[in-house]
Image (cartoon, coloured by chain):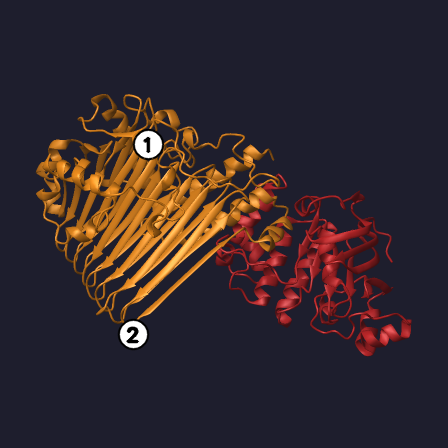
Chain colours: A orange, B red
Amino acid sequence: MAARREAGAQLAALAWPAEAEEDWRYSGIDRFDPDRFAPVVSEGDGEDVEPAQALARQWAEALGPAVATVVTLDGRLVVASGSLAEVDGGFDGEGPAAGLQVRSGLRSAVPLRRAAALGPGDPPDAFGVLHRAFSADPVLVGVGNGRQVEGLVLVVHAIRQAPLEGVGRAVFPELRVEVGEGARLGLVEVLASLPPGGPAASTGASRNGSAVPDVAEGERPVPGQRGAARPGTDHEVAVWSGPPGGPLAVLVSGWQVAAGGQLDYGGIQALDRSASAVVFQASGVERDGRLRALTAATGAGWARVRTDAAVLGQGARSELLAGFLAQGRQVLDFRTFQDHQAPFGESELLFKGAVGDRARSVYSGLIRVRRGARGTNAYQTNHNLVLAEGARADSVPNLDIEENDVRCSHASTVGPIDEEQRYYLACRGIEPAVADRLVVRGFFGDLVSRAPIATVGAWLDRTVAARLGQAEREEGR
Amino acid sequence: MSGARPALEVRGLRAAVAGREVLRGVDLVVGAGEVHAVMGPNGAGKSTLSHVLMGRPGYEVLGGSVLVDGEELGHLATWERARRGLFLAPQVPTEVPGVPLRAVLAEALAARGEAAPPADALVAAAGAVGLAPAFLDRPVNVDLSGGERKRSEVLQLAVVRPRVAVLDEIDSGLDVDGLRAVARRVLAEVRERGLAVLAITHYPRLLSELVPDRVHVLLGGRVVQSGGPELAEELERTGYAGLAAALGVEAEGADEPGTAG
């Protein structure tokens, strides 16, 4: 409670974020109404535990067998690999042997060597302060020194959609990953909605035998919201406008990779469009460690992801990939911060997005090379495809170099589908909507092929194809 | 001229690009199972003709008609023309990053209501034009040599099986062996199932392998002369300027190397 009181005081002193701040430019935050949400502070609702587990099973089927599965429901831990009891005691006796531990509990239960580097920003903004106050069950996944975990660890954060006493649920899930020296771990983290009545209600659109919906029911664009590509419609772009009563998920996901360790991370954001999300991804990689991450985001009505990647040790490498698709009136907002604190580190960032209908996306990134981080290689690339006249993508790359003898570059593009490509495919008899689907899938192709966890790349490809195919059908071929 | 049933008929075709009239009344009839060559200097309107036939956006048709198997296509979009049997192998095939050739072929066939051919049939089709199987999974035209692109075009032609193929400089970038393989593949389509070919070329070199039934000379946006294969040989001797002088026509573009055709 002390943390909550402290947070309350901090919050009172903090201004709510505003678009006038560089960090929130273009984000639509000015229309964000915190009074539409209330934190969920009670214990998890027992009757939704089974549906949450069912949701996790479906994701496990889609993403491949997991050696450990952790499920949270509205930010509260409900199960880890079968039962909560196994969590605290290790994993069926295999846990310590395999060097894998999953725990829940307060942050202080496991000391994180550089906790400050893995928090929701320093200093945290209002969402970060709220998260500190209300995160109840941080999930801790740790791999001991020298251990190689065979198979995936799957963490599913299920977010209920129904309002609580008339207001949207504000929930605060948290994941902390610690990869020991020379250890290796593959982990997938899913942020997904739990529809009323459980996940079975929304499996209709699944493909390739996957039980996980490629397209959730709530993601279907409402007819009449489409058509902004036609001439004569206004060009007003979407701003934050989640329907009243939808949930807000504030997720902190922190990844610590010790010297010589490697983390392969896959993140999926597949929330229903009634949901809003604020995600903090924070990573720190020590000497000669390696982080490879792909985040695939196609859900939520409004979602912001801040990615802080710190190169902490000499020769450490981070590879940060993200692919996103926004349609209807979705707003997807990405802020990245590559922070080089040690010499001869490398960070390569590639974020690619497509926006259709009246959706909008924002990318803004900063590479910072601190004094002493000589020999740094840092790259930042953001490419955006704008699929409709009413859609908009903003891209703002930045560099802040305090050291000589570094190689840094940034590149960004925003543009429509190339007419030459459309024409070439038309010469093969391929109509424009199908050609666009091919081109957009191709656009994400390098992310798919470079995905550190192949099934996450495949999910992105499948979801993009399904969502564009659906838009195509709605246009009436 | 043979009496083959017309597969492609171009009648009085006039078109402008960026407000400038480039085609000034083109007339051509290519019968099923025939190979016709269109020759002309840079700037004569050769590539423009290929794009106007395909209905490329940005090209303004001022008059005339384009028929495939007797059906007027002039009002149709490019993809609709392609589905009615018209195929263009463009001079510079476009790169489509991330999209494998296999996917393009599958969609092209799906567009015609056909299933994708078995994998081994595709591999065989690629082999017939000298392309390795792995080529099918590479993104279309990305990082390919000029010759590979042309082989890929002919592979696509063989899989899609159009009625009429417009081949724009299909010989460019190909070495002698490549040219022979590509020409052989095209001629197989011509002989076996009556493909009609309109081969646009700069140089007579192509025509020694892809021997035409008819040769048309395009100068200043018009077909100024048509004849048998011997016309190509004559052109090699006289050059386009010589021909223009002999015919007393204005050879616009004849002395403008490097301008788009």
> Of the residues under marks 2 and 1, which one precedes in the sequence?
1
Q: Secondary structure at mark 2?
A: loop
- Residue B1 in percent (x, y) is at 87, 58
Near-viewer residue (A108 or B28): A108
Circle 2 or circle 1, nearest the eye: 2
- Amino acid on which disc 2 is placed: Asp
Query: Can see residue A104?
Result: no
What is the spatial separation of the Cα atoms under label 2 and label 1, in whole angstroms?
47 Å
- Image x and y of residue A196, in percent: 33, 23
Q: Chain of mark 2?
A: A
Q: Chain of mark 1?
A: A
Q: In the rendered view of the protein, which quadrant contains the N terminus of chain A? A: top left
Observer-nearest of A30 and A151: A30
Question: Residue A249's image quarter?
Answer: top left
Q: Read off the residue under disc 1.
A: A193
Are dots 2 and 1 on a single chain? yes
In the image, residue A277 above or below residue B5: above
B150 up-or-down from B31: above or below: below
User: Does residue A162 show up?
Assistant: yes
Q: Is residue B235 left or right of residue B94?
A: right
